[in-house]
Image (tube, coloured by chain):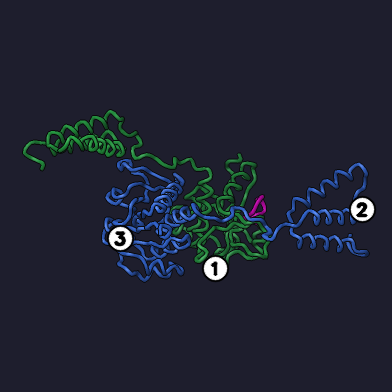
Chain colours: A blue, B green
Amino acid sequence: MSETIQPAIILVRPQLGENIGKAARAMLNFGLTDMRLVAPRDGWPNPAAGPAASGADVILDNAKVFDTVEAAIADCTTVYASTVRDRDMPKPVVTPRVCSAEMHAAIARSERPAILFGPERSGLSNDDVALADTVLTVPVNPEFGSLNLAQAVILLAYEFSQAVDKTTPIQPAHPDGAAPKSEFLGLIEHLEAALEGRGFFRSEDRRATQKRMLQNLFHSAGWSTQEIHTMRGIIRSLTRDGQGE
Amino acid sequence: MSETIQPAIILVRPQLGENIGKAARAMLNFGLTDMRLVAPRDGWPNPAAGPAASGADVILDNAKVFDTVEAAIADCTTVYASTVRDRDMPKPVVTPRVCSAEMHAAIARSERPAILFGPERSGLSNDDVALADTVLTVPVNPEFGSLNLAQAVILLAYEFSQAVDKTTPIQPAHPDGAAPKSEFLGLIEHLEAALEGRGFFRSEDRRATQKRMLQNLFHSAGWSTQEIHTMRGIIRSLTRDGQGE
């Protein structure tokens, strides 16, 4: 039901087939599938699109082609125009993150949002933007704002996917778990005994400090059981008679 | 001071000059300037990079070239490897959003973080990844994860910029402000009088409902003073004697 509604990604008068292909790839990377083309300059299908899609052919094969923006947005409820604000166009302006949140909310109401992306060279015309509810502007470097079509699409697709992404933001080094403290303590004891035998703890004064340093060194390492075994092998190897220092 | 430190964006054994140029453009779009190249396949400088940078030549001109990853990361404190997790590599894995937050925190401590991006075809080798502290993985569509080099760079650069971006997430349609309620009320009064004259309110029963509908219609429009003037001009035009309906 509502979860199968996808935002329509509408490329308005796109020029190069290669860029249509790259936009398709960017979409599929983040699970977007509803591509629409308004009056593509070189017709459709375009042989340059497939290779640039790098395997996202399913998006191109299912792309719908329209003569006008009006026809492309006919079944949509809210339309965003990807462009920079024009002071003469009285539209609210949102960031990709807000646009994504709004689109997910719309889809949850069984509505279909759409985003218009303009031609590579000129961007959306004022007549295109006038058909939109809201302007969508990526906050770029004010001294170098030069997003190409596929980059604009991928940033939006990424944000749309991030809004519902369930990836654990920080995954530990050892998915099967770090070693239990008993193993760390065993390692430290092993090392202390080895160092004791070699006269590492020269003065009784510094012994407590040095042992604390060893504790900090090893507990902060976050090693796995395997890595602790490796360290103990290293200690055994270094303390073997007739070898080492 | 610390605010001038930039994360190092390190392209490891990049193959095509075009992709180096696109990565430079992606970096500058979001204000990143420290590009480093490790053993670029076709040497450096590469004549294909400039055109693809679309004006971000300053990044290419200042790119530093190294023979090894070790040399490229020598002055960095924390190194992220942009790749997917390899079960055999015991590294924590973070999302671009977490990586960005961590990098800003490192820079605030005057540290210099770095991110390694691998060659287009093969990605980073296990030896490259072993030099990193942490793996950075973009959560892509599990059925189609096909990010190219410049796309991976732009997503990271975008997140790094978003973490400190001050853009107002929703800007109103009228930066100079919507019209005050007095002007909306004046418009509604004007319209009611015009409709009254034309017999729009046919029954006394429905008059209250219809007037409430007019209030809702106009207060929700969020128009500017100029737009209210335009609406009043429309009403005057439609009620002019001998014209209109």
Q: Position of residue B53 (x, y in %)?
A: 46, 56
| Rendered residue at 53%/53% (across/down) | B156
- The relative height of residue A189 versus residue B177 in the rendered view (above or below) is below
Instruction: Please state which amino acid type lies under the numbered disc 3.
Output: Val
Q: Residue at x 88, y 44 (%)?
A: A208
Q: Is residue B154 left or right of residue A229?
A: left
Q: Is residue A86 left or right of B94 when viewed as pictured? A: left
Whether residue B74 is in magenta: the answer is yes
**Part of the protein shown in magenta:** B71-80
Q: Residue A161's spot in the image, x, y percent? A: 48, 55
Q: Is the residue marked by circle 3 packed among few (<14), some (14-19), or many (20+) residues within 10 Å?
A: many
Mark 1 and 2 residues: CB-CB less than 8 Å, in contact?
A: no
Q: Which residue is mark 2?
A: A196
Image spot of residue A137 (x, y percent): 40, 47
Q: Which residue corresponds to mark 3?
A: A38
Q: Is residue A188 left or right of residue A93?
A: right
